[in-house]
């Protein structure tokens, strides 16, 4: 299948990794244009949202046990989230046309073939949705992974792929009228979790460092806990649900904040207090976000009508992806970091 791109040099600018490492491993350079395959769109990228899996890949998945680390062919282009304009459409694709504005989390989960840090991306049409009217490419690129993660944890799983780390399928729980705590509330996943839980009628307690209080109250948080002043597990009680976007080995501290029959959703793996959870009658469940164009279209409607919004922490040109990763490593992110692509 021929690429119908205006650039006929056969190359594009992209950020590639040749060897795993710190932010300096991200090289802005020429790379081959992607080849459009059956079922795919070729998109000219206007903005790229950055996410933790981008640095997990950059670092060679060093936090995974060695036997779990995937083998990544080098050089590799990182990144999953993008917004742009359709440049070419495979003949079997009917839902999109050349010139459409689209956004996506492409090919996730996958290891090394998502490739969003680039001027052009070719990816399955089913991973895309039309960009909501009224938000720009920066906002649209910021949303996909963070919003889909909050959606698939809280609203609708949207797939049947078994999580290898737990026996039961992940089930969202009812939110209307429930008391819900969101830990890491100011970050990418957290700020969508706060808004989606409020939209569904929950009473939301947001946990973040103090500088995010006004931001989170403006997004609809009913209560705010500054974790730098008070440990949330010491002050929150009688909760129906905790979504802990930090997760990891410390997530079990939230068990004592939950009612019997409540649920703890750690967004990052590492939970190991199964016995205490069973004793307290609490369900602990997680999932891994998966690409889903139709869910993204629904999220897009909520963004378009102002029911939810996406916050931009900072933007950097694609050529400065290293600086964007340095900003991320500094922490305390409010919303999302986005790379802009020159036109
Ligand atoms: N399961 C999945 O499929 C899935 C999908 C997406 C992401 N994830 C994982 O979810 C995690 C969060 O991702 P993200 O994109 O939302 O990250 P992020 O944008 O970096 O947000 C993290 C937030 O946590 C806050 N924070 C840091 N330490 C804290 C603490 N001790 N208590 C409360 N808040 C704290 C930070 O700001 P302050 O410290 O200033 O409050 C920041 O706003 C990552 O580990 C990521 O890998 C998993």
Image: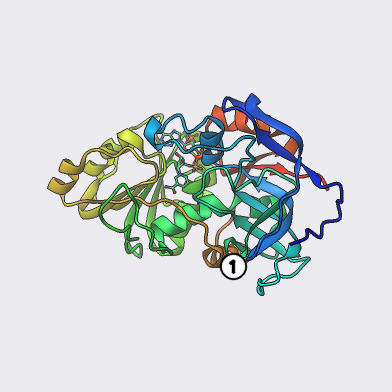
Residue at 40% over, 61% down: 157
Question: The N terminus is located in which quarter?
Answer: bottom right
Report the residue that reaches farthest toward the left.
Answer: 279
Q: Would residue 280 be found to the left or right of residue 268 on screen?
A: left
Image point (86%, 55%), residue name: 6
Q: Nearer the viewer, residue 295 or 314?
A: 295
Q: Position of residue 190 (x, y in %)?
A: 47, 47
Nearer to the camera, 82 or 336: 82
Residue 177 visible to an observer of this rendering? yes
Q: Is residue 126 left or right of residue 339?
A: left
State how many labels appear: 1
Q: Secondary structure at mark 1?
A: helix
Determine which residue is flagged by label 1: 301
Q: Looking at the image, which is closer to me, 339 or 262?
A: 339
Q: From what the image shows, is residue 195 above or below residue 315? A: below
**Within the image, what quadrant is residue 58 found in?**
top right
- Whether the residue under disc 1 has CB within 8 Å of ligand 1: no
Q: Is residue 131 visible?
A: no
Query: Which class describes the residues within 10 Å of circle 1: few (<14), some (14-19), or many (20+)?
Result: some
Residue at 54% across / 68% down in the picture? Answer: 294
User: Is 173 left or right of 124, judged from the image as shown?
Assistant: left
Colouring? rainbow
Q: Looking at the image, is 70 positioned above or below residue 82?
A: above
Q: Residue furthest front?
A: 1
Q: Position of residue 244 (x, y in %)?
A: 37, 44
In this image, 109 relative to 173: left or right? right
Q: Position of residue 43 (x, y in %)?
A: 72, 57
Tell me residue 109's x, y (percent). Answer: 49, 50
């Amino acid at each position: 299948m021929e690429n119908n791109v205006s650039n006929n040099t056969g190359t594009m600018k992209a950020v590639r990794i040749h060897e795993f490492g710190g932010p300096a491993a991200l090289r802005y350079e020429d790379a081959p244009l992607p080849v459009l395959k059956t079922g795919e769109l070729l998109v000219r990228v206007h903005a790229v949202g950055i996410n933790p899996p981008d640095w997990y890949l950059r670092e060679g998945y060093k936090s995974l046990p060695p036997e779990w680390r995937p083998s990544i062919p080098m050089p590799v282009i990182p990144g999953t989230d993008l917004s742009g304009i359709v440049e070419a459409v495979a003949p079997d694709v009917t839902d999109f046309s050349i010139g459409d504005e689209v956004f996506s989390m492409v090919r996730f989960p996958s290891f090394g073939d998502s490739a969003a840090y680039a001027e052009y991306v070719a990816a399955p049409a089913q991973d895309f949705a039309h960009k909501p009217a009224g938000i720009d490419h920066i906002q649209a690129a910021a949303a996909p992974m963070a919003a889909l993660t909050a959606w698939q944890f809280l609203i609708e799983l949207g797939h049947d792929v078994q999580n290898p780390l737990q026996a039961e399928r992940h089930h969202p729980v009812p939110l209307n009228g429930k008391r819900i705590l969101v830990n890491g509330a100011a970050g990418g996943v957290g700020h969508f979790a706060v808004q989606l839980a409020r939209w569904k009628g929950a009473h939301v307690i947001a946990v973040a460092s103090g500088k995010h209080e006004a931001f989170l109250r403006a997004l609809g948080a009913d209560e705010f806990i500054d974790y730098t002043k008070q440990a949330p597990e010491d002050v929150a009680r009688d909760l129906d649900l905790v979504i802990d976007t930090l997760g990891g080995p410390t997530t079990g501290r939230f068990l004592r904040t939950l009612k019997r029959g409540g649920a703890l959703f750690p967004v990052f793996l590492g939970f190991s207090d199964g016995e205490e959870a069973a004793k307290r009658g609490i369900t602990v469940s997680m999932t891994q976000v998966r690409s889903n164009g139709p869910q993204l279209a629904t999220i897009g409607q909520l963004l378009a009508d102002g029911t939810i919004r996406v916050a931009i922490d900072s933007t950097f040109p694609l050529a400065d992806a290293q600086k964007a990763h340095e900003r991320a490593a500094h922490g305390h992110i409010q919303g999302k970091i986005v790379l802009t692509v020159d036109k």
